[in-house]
Image (cartoon, helix red, strand yellow):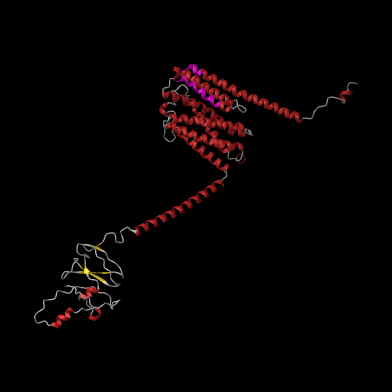
């Protein structure tokens, strides 16, 4: 059906009734010869929804022009896109195939006043014009997400800052002396558990079999007999006694315990580290750890010299265990060096193993003598070192490898070390008794020998 050039009367601004879907009228039957001129004029006259008075759809050319009828494809010649401006509430009717065909289905699009409906050729919307095109809406969503992430990061940062500040204030309010006592206790427990692991209490290898057997009595010339390791029982009992003693209220805030506690705790952890490294066959690491352990105990002895014990009980529960600990670690360090050099196959200057072993015992003797010459003479250090040297001599005489000259030199080192420590103790005690006698004489009233009865007795 063709659209007349005259669109008909102007439609009102607001339709009388809601817009309806326009349906194309069926093709009119060809007029017969008997059709009157009046009927042809009525068929050509434009009809509106308001003038028709019925509820049916308007199919007149004028009504189609008023509602914005166009082909469904929205195309013009050449496939160009066409934009239609329609009034508010109007409908856009398009043929299903993009062109008006008799009997073709139609669809209606509602658009607001002044809205445009660009469509590409083929009846589809132009690309980039839909709501999912990712234009300004996507950028706005990204901006909102960034703002929210920044706000969440700021809140998280403030919470972490407040939590760390509160934790720091809480930790700073702790009693440092109590913290030290707790740390010493925990380290003592770890050290004892480590010693149990060293004797296969938890299924691991023993120190004797660790590192390929390099710590066994017959591995090197400086390795003592297995009986010598029983001194660890005495050392651990002494460390437990020290741990209990430092919990006494009278010892909590003393300068001696404040300087000594952290060093002893570190030595206990180093002892555990040495056992674990030896069981893991880390010979080099075990050598480094035992040297650190030696220097830690050396620092502990220096602290005890700077802050002497005040009672005999303190000397027995603090000085004696640490002295035994240091004396044995000194000998164990020498044995560890011997195992390391043996594993490395070192042949320094072409000297024999006995010569190097005598040199090692000499180094142990000099170091122990220097330590025993401090304070009143560290007899505990001398006793532990002499114990180890004694069992080296026994092993070299009754075990393998046999070295009688080395055993003789070890016995000589024991004698010299005990003489050094005993001489220091005797000299310090003698000076103390001399000082004490001088103090007593200073408090005694002077004796007057002249005058009085003496003069009278002459006559």
Q: Is residue 358 above or below residue 139?
A: above
What is the chief secondary structure element of the magenta stretch? Answer: helix
Q: Quadrant of the N terminus?
A: bottom left
Q: Compare residues 218 and 53 and report the one nearer the observer.
A: 53
Q: Decide if residue 319 is in sight here.
A: no
Q: Quadrant of the C terminus?
A: top right
Q: What is the number of callouts on the image?
A: 0
Q: Compare residues 30 and 248 and report the one nearer the observer.
A: 30
- Residue 31 locus on image (x, y percent): 11, 78
Q: Quadrant of residue 209?
A: top left
Task: Work out which residue is located at the far left of the displayed protein and give it.
Answer: 33
- Residue 210 locus on image (x, y percent): 42, 29
Q: Which residues are magenta?
A: 383-407
Task: Work out which residue is located at the far right of the displayed protein and give it.
Answer: 459
Q: Compare residues 250 and 347 and report the one nearer the observer.
A: 347
Q: Is residue 212 above or below residue 75?
A: above
Task: Work out which residue is located at the far front of the displayed protein and give it.
Answer: 5
Q: Is residue 384 magenta?
A: yes
Q: Is residue 190 above or below residue 377?
A: below
Q: Compare residues 336 and 154 and report the one nearer the observer.
A: 154
Q: Decide if residue 379 is in sight here.
A: yes
Q: Quadrant of residue 401?
A: top left
Q: Is residue 130 magenta?
A: no
Q: Who's the residue at 48% across and 50% down the image?
A: 160
Going by the image, does 108 lie left or right of 225? left
- Residue 82 locus on image (x, y percent): 24, 65
- Residue 432 locus on image (x, y percent): 68, 27
Q: Quadrant of residue 182?
A: top right
Going by the image, does 154 lie left or right of 102? right
């Amino acid at each position: 059906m063709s659209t007349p050039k005259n669109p008909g009367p102007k439609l009102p601004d607001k339709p009388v009734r809601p817009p309806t879907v326009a349906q194309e009228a069926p093709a009119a039957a060809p007029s017969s010869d008997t059709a009157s001129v009046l009927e042809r004029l009525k068929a050509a006259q434009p009809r509106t929804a308001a003038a028709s008075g019925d509820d049916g759809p308007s199919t007149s050319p004028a009504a189609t022009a008023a509602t914005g009828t166009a082909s469904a494809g929205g195309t013009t010649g050449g496939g160009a896109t066409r934009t239609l401006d329609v009034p508010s509430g109007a409908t856009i009717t398009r043929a299903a195939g993009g062109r008006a065909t008799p009997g073709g289905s139609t669809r209606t699009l509602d658009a607001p006043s002044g809205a445009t409906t660009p469509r590409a050729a083929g009846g589809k919307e132009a690309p980039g014009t839909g709501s999912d095109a990712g234009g300004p809406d996507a950028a706005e969503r990204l901006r909102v997400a960034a703002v929210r992430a920044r706000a969440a990061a700021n809140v998280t940062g403030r919470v972490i800052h407040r939590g760390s500040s509160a934790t720091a204030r809480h930790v700073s309010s702790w009693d440092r002396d109590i913290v030290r006592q707790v740390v010493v206790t925990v380290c003592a427990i770890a050290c004892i558990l480590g010693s149990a692991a060293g004797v296969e209490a938890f299924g691991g290898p023993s120190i004797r079999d660790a590192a390929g057997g390099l710590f066994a009595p017959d591995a090197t010339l400086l390795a003592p007999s297995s009986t010598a390791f029983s001194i660890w029982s005495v050392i651990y009992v002494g460390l437990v006694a020290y741990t209990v003693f430092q919990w006494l209220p009278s010892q909590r805030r003393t300068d001696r315990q404040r300087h000594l506690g952290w060093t002893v705790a570190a030595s206990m952890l180093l002892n555990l580290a040495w056992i674990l490294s030896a069981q893991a066959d880390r010979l080099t690491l075990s050598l480094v750890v035992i040297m650190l352990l030696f220097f830690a105990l050396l620092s502990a002895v220096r602290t005890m010299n700077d802050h002497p014990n005040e009672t005999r009980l303190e000397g027995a529960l603090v000085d004696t265990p640490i002295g035994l600990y240091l004396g044995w670690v000194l000998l164990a360090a020498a044995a560890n060096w011997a195992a390391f050099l043996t594993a490395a196959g070192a042949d320094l200057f072409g000297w024999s193993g006995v010569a190097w072993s005598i040199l090692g015992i000499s180094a142990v003797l000099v170091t122990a003598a220097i330590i025993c010459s401090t304070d009143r003479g560290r007899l505990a250090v001398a006793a532990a070192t002499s114990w180890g040297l004694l069992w080296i001599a026994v092993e070299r005489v009754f075990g393998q490898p046999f070295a009688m000259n080395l055993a003789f030199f070890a016995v000589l080192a024991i004698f010299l070390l005990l003489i050094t420590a005993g001489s220091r103790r005797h000299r310090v005690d003698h000076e103390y008794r001399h000082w004490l006698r001088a103090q007593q004489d200073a408090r005694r009233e002077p004796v007057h020998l002249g005058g009085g009865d003496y003069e009278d007795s002459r006559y």
